[in-house]
Amino acid sequence: MGKLSVQHLIFTRVESSYSPKQSSGYQVVYQSDGLQAEARQIEKRLQCFDSSQQENERYQFFWTTRGQAVLARTFPLGFPTNREVIDRWQRAAFLAHALVLSKEAFASIHHDPFTLFDLANSPFVADDEQLVDYLRGETLDEQLNVPLRTSRDVNYLLSSWSEEELWKLFALGMQTDQLKKKKQSLLLLSEEAEDALDLLRLTTFLLPPENRLACTFDTYIETCMPPPGLFWLVCGKQGKNQAGFLPMRLSAQALEAQTGFFSSFPAGRAGEIFQRRLNRLRQR
């Protein structure tokens, strides 16, 4: 495919001399010129994160009210070495970097967030050293070379999942409309964050591109619980006793949920689509 057009927004903590507002603290420190009112919407989704644990990392996919797809990665900066830039007291901080795509641009990558999240030459800021380059005037590339994901990029994950469990993943992705109407979200409980990411990688590829549009997610909600229905699926380690969240536990490549949770989804036409998608995924 040709070049993919994206816009960037970076939210982190900086000292006043590196701040667009000339004030220290957490704020948007880099923003593409084309981003307008939606920048504030995106910032609100990024600004809550626990930076105290170095292994924490968050991936988000959501939409702005202007119909732009947002793919964001958030990670701890630890205790940054660039004290004069990030925090003179060298306290733990975090950085969130969002890529913003038009509907047309997102359609060109088949509505697949992991096309960008798993890109070998990552478009996301990697550390505070790279951030400093952009704060000092270097610009982020807004035209990316992005190969589409293929079955070869994903089918290594199939070996651990039974066909019955794969059907569950597919069924969850096909029920987004019902969840949205009821203002509900799926709550995926997993001790291993990478296992939850792999489930999303696999589910996204199994679904037809048009069904991926509503499969928004937030992979780390331990200290920042969103309202139910804001995302299709959220991930955490602990169960949340909160109305509107439907808990499922991921254990040894199997999904455990309340009785009848999966069986309520009809087979029929959906079953035929599932088999076609699964056969395609098995191709090498």
Image (spheres, grey):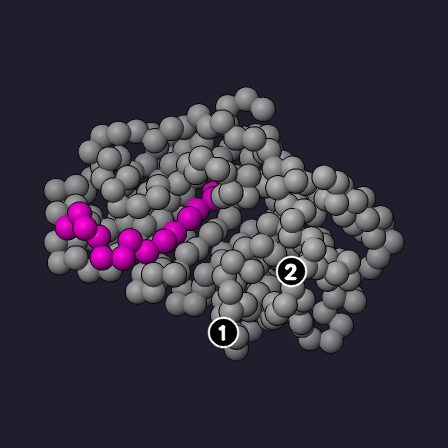
CA gap, disc 1 and disc 2: 21 Å
Give the extent of the magenta segment: 69-83
Looking at the magenta stretch, what is its main secondary structure? strand
Pick the front one: 24 or 183: 24
Relative height, residue 109 to residue 236 (above, below): above
| Mark linked to residue 238 | 1
Q: Quadrant of residue 94?
A: bottom left
Where in the figure is residue 96, as x and y percent of width and height? Answer: 36, 49
Residue 72 in the figure: left or right of residue 198: left
Task: Residue at the far top: name it.
Answer: 2
Where in the figure is residue 107, as x and y percent of width and height? Answer: 60, 33
Where in the figure is residue 106, as x and y percent of width and height? Answer: 56, 35
Residue position for label 2 = 179
Q: Amino acid at mark 2?
A: Leu
Q: Where does the N terminus fall, quadrant-wise? A: top right
Residue drawn at (45%, 64%) of the image: 221
Task: Residue at the far right: name it.
Answer: 268
Q: Amino acid at mark 1?
A: Gln
